[in-house]
Structures are given as C-alpha cells and as structure tokens.
Image (spheres, helix red, strand yellow):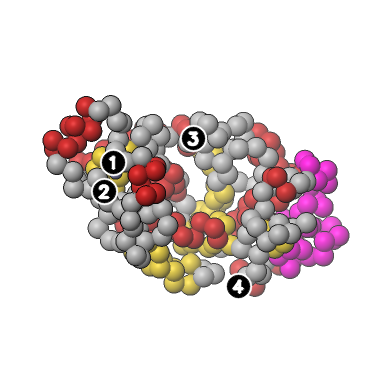
Amino acid sequence: MTAGAGRYAPTPSGDLHIGNLRTALLAWLFARRTGRAFRLRIDDLDPDRSRDPAGQLADLAALGLTHDGPIVRQSARTSSYAKVLDGLIEGGLVYECFCTRREIAEAPTAPHHPPGAYPGTCRSLTRSEIEAKHASGRTPALRLRAEVSALTIEDELHGAFAGGVDDMVLRRADGVHAYNLAVVIDDHDIGVDQVVRGDDLLASTPRQAYLYDVLGHPRPSYVHVPLVLNAQGQRLAKRDGPVTMRDLGLPAHLVLAMLGASLGLCADDEQVDVEVLLDRFDPNAIPQEPWVFG
Ligand SMILES: [Zn+2]
C-alpha cells in the first residue's frame, strides 16, 4: 500500500441516492486499484444541512466499501481550519467582505470569471470604509486575496481543465468556515492525494487547487466522474422518486450489481461483490457518458 489515500466525503443530508452511491463506489475502486487507502469523511460543516450520518455509513458498508482509519467529521475540525486561516491572515492574504449575496449577484463580473464569481468589491476598502461598515452592524465574511484569475488543473478523465479563480470566501459571515477551505485542509491533513467526485464539481476545482498552491501543499490527482441523471436529463435528486437503497427496497448485492452494470463491470443480475468489480475495474474504460437512472 502506498502512502496516499482516496476518499468519499458525503454531506449528511439524508440517505444517499443511487448517484451518490455510484460515485462512492468509483472513489473506492480508483483508490483500491491504485493501492491507496480509502478514507471516509462526513462533510457536516453546515449545521443547518447536517443530519445523523448513520444511515449513509450503513449503506456504504452494506455495499462492501471498506475504509481505513477513523471517520473524520468536519464539525470536529474547526480549530484546524481556524489555525490555517490565521496563517493566511498573518500573511496578508485575507480581507473582510461586507457584501450581501444580492450585491454580489448584481455586480458586474470580469468576463472570464464563472457566474457567481466575486467581483472584488471589498478588496481595496480603506480603513475608514471598513470601520463604517462595522459600525453599521454588518458582519464580514473573510475572503482570499487571490493573485490569479484562472488556473489549469489536470483531471484523469477530462485532461487539462482551465477554470476561474476568484477571491473565494474562506469564512462565511456567520462564522462557518467555507467548504473550499475545509476540504483542502482536510484532504491534506488526512493524506488524501486522490480526489474522485462528481463532475458537477469540476468547475470549482481550480479554486481548490489554487488553495493548495497558496498553502504550499501538493495538489491531489483529480478524477471527476460522470453524474447520474434522471429521465429528464437532470442531475438525479431525491425528489425523483425511489432513488435511495431504502426506497428502492433492494438488497445491497442487487444495488451493487446495478451500479457495477452501469460501469460495464458486470451484468445487472450477476452475483458480484466489490472485490470482483475491483478485479475487473479499468480506470481508463469507465463510461464517459452520464448514467440515466429511471
Ligand atoms: Zn464584498
């Protein structure tokens, strides 16, 4: 086993649906195929969206997706995020942003920036302007003073991918550390050097890669895998009907065979376990098209 690790990191917002489970299986296959450990992390930073992850963990275990080391919970790691953030503040790389969501949405953005990119409104506020904002009762978010506006990353399935980097939020106005900051610190701290996840996250990856660069950490290898879509061609969601293991009412081995079949690794009624799928798994041969479910 090499020193590196892959991971799966669900947000505990209820049962995993078949698309989440397929991504988890792919993350496990990629990690095990390359001799890596496999870590599980619960991305429960946002208290409003977090539920008990027991059901999610039970489903992953039922599929046979073994993991190494303790399960990490982001909610228990805020002191690590605060420490890294302090270092960035000391380095002059952080500024206060008083903008509301609406102000950002209405501000003009630079042409090469993705929709929703921060236009830099508060980047050069004077000391008296900052004091006036504080005096008006606004609580600031903290943003990274980015020195690039775009970055190219390498993805194992997509090749070179160029995307925008803006002055991303590091800590929200409500004091919660930003997802982009937390995942980079977490993955570095627990030795994750392979990130396999849905390709809806590809656009945000240059931001995270830039944070690795700023923190002086080597970037992980990235694998953005095709999503599972509903019959209308939209990203699968729980409102699409029976899409969780519980709602489907199928035993785990049939769900696994269904996932394996969608990856071309078995027939959908074949008796397989994850080790069989691993034996047959070729990272270069996974379907590039989304899988339509339902
Ligand atoms: Zn601002």
* Residue 240 percent across, percent down from the top left: 72, 49
Q: Which mark is residue 97?
A: 1
Q: CA distance from mark 2 to mark 3?
A: 26 Å
Which badge, 4 or 2, comes first in the chain's sequence? 2
Amino acid under disc 4: Asn
Q: Which residue is mark 3?
A: 46
Q: CA distance from mark 4 to mark 1?
A: 43 Å
Q: Is mark 1 within 8 Å of ligand 1?
A: yes
Q: Which image quarter is the C terminus in?
A: bottom right
* Residue 147 percent across, percent down from the top left: 25, 58
| Residue toward you, 3 or 67 | 67
The residue depicted at 27 percent of the width and 51 percent of the height is 120
Amino acid under disc 1: Cys
- Pointer 3 with pointer 1, Cβ within 8 A: no
Q: Is mark 2 within 8 Å of ligand 1?
A: yes
Number of the front mark, 3 or 4: 3
Which badge, 3 or 4, comes first in the chain's sequence? 3
Q: Which residue is mark 4?
A: 284
Number of the front mark, 1 or 2: 2
Determine the secondary structure under disc 4.
Answer: helix
Which residue range is magenta in the image?
246-275
Determine the secondary structure under disc 1.
Answer: strand
* Residue 274 percent across, percent down from the top left: 72, 55
Which badge, 1 or 2, comes first in the chain's sequence? 1
